[in-house]
Image: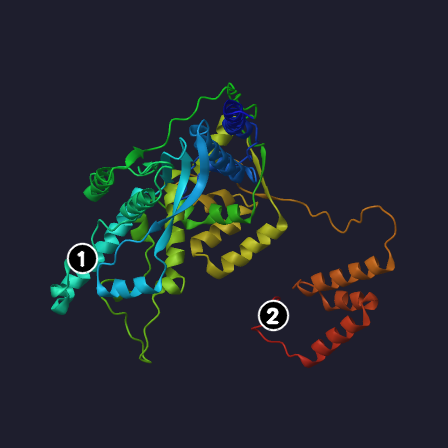
Amino acid sequence: MTDNQHRNDLLSQRNQLSAALESLPLVLSKVPKPPILNLLSPGDDAGEDDNINSVPGLRAFEANLEKEIDALDKEIQAAASLVSVGQTFPAPKASPENNQEKARHKRKEDTVPVKVDIVSDEGTTWIRVNTIKNSRLRAEFNEIDAYTDSEDEDGGDDDHAPAMERPDWRNNSVLRMASSLLAAAQAHPIPGTTRPPIVFLRLTRLRPNAKEPRIAQTIQEVEKMGIRLWMGEREPIPSAVKPQEPTPSLQAEPVPTIDINLDLSLLVAIVSDITHAPTPSTPEEAKERYKPLVRRPWKNKSEAPVDSNGGSETPPEQNGISIHSRALCNQAEQERRHSLFNEVRGRLQTHYPSSVPTFYSSAEARDRLVRIMTKIAGPNERRRAEALFSTDPDAEQRFWQGSRFPSGYVQGLIPIRVHPEAGDQRLQGPPLSPFLAQLETTCKYILSGIQESASSAEVATEQVNLPIKLVTQRVKKQSSTATSPALTPHT
């Protein structure tokens, strides 16, 4: 295969990969999105990454395509006179600058390996690609500055140390790489001559920054060494395949039905004081409203408070107080930006301007809401929860009492209907095997044990068909275990 044929094959492969990469937006446009009405959440910004994450493996596929295209670009650039790719050359070490370095130098080899990404033009050109970023180089400078400042603060004998032993910003990774490339080029001249090959260094992600002048000075130092420097990404090779224009998505906007089902989280949000109370005008006001009531003097002091035993007192951030405060603050901020009732009312009026919706929930969600209200709810929240499912004439007035919304702001919300329970309906099918029948009996027994309303007569009836071991365990438990108010269905 000739060099031209090899280069054409590389171009053809790159064009195919580029066409696959450019077709990803078309693939994403055809992926159906979940029918979520409120796409925003506190502290989250909707971005393009959400779409690509919706298809498992698509992000990894995109990253692999980009890597393959970059590798092909390197080969295409030097395909006409390519000698090698990714070759390593031994280079002599720099001469030691102090006694400590000399001692280490005697115990190690005299050469270090230097990587060259592309050797082309019959060995006369070396190309090295490096992806170091400004942030990485600034981190190196900060580390050098911190080392130097600590020496200046210590004083003493360090003030008389030789200047060559002190760290210098010129000892950064870019200049060290450039020096090693030059040393390797000097040690490996062009075959048949005494001239070293020309060294090209491409820094794809490094940009001069006014805030850190040493980055620009580093680039100038590399150019002073005689290295040909390229900055930024290489211009992409034009694709021979015409990219397809993404077609508009045919998926319609999700439309709510006139019958709306509410789960437990929505029931809690509907009766919550955060939903009904006046919203904070700014995020700072929300933080101030829900900040912990525990004093935290160690916020402004270097030492934490000491408890009665002489140990450090546990800050509230470690026992959950701050976590709950942030959650309440985020919920208030969400209510300020996108109110729950305004969202529901606006969408229902848009799609059903002349109809009254019907709200439903399950008996389990209703019962769990009642248990939550008896434990952690305030008096206003308990009143709203009682009125939420009530059919009394004044139920709606009691629900909206004290709210920042007027009475009847969301039509049809009061009362919430409860789905009728299906009961114990057995699906028609073949008779169960003895094993499955026994398994069904055991599962029913386990479920009946966590129902607080099960009567003793029902328990005795169920024991007839129970396994012997389970019946024995239940009898022993009933006869030997005293009733404890601390026990719960989970203990």
Residue placed most toward the observer, 438 or 31: 31
Residue placed most toward the observer, 293 or 74: 74
Tell me the quadrant of the picture where the N terminus can be found.
top right
Image quadrant where residue 478 sits: bottom right
- Image disc number at residue 164: 1
Looking at the picture, does residue 19 appear above or below residue 278?
above
Sequence-first tag of 1 and 2: 1
Image quadrant where residue 280 sits: top left
* Secondary-structure class at tag 2: loop
Image location of residue 316, percent across then percent down:
35, 64
- Image disc number at residue 491: 2
Q: Residue at x 41, y 32 (%)?
A: 122
Image location of residue 476, percent across then percent down:
73, 78
Q: Amino acid at mark 1?
A: Met
Q: Is residue 230 left or right of residue 48?
A: left
- Image disc number at residue 431: none
Looking at the picture, does residue 152 appear above or below residue 487?
above
Q: Residue at x 47, y 52 (%)?
A: 383
Image location of residue 77, percent across then percent down:
42, 29
Tell me the quadrant of the picture where the C terminus can be found.
bottom right
Does the image show residue 349? Answer: yes
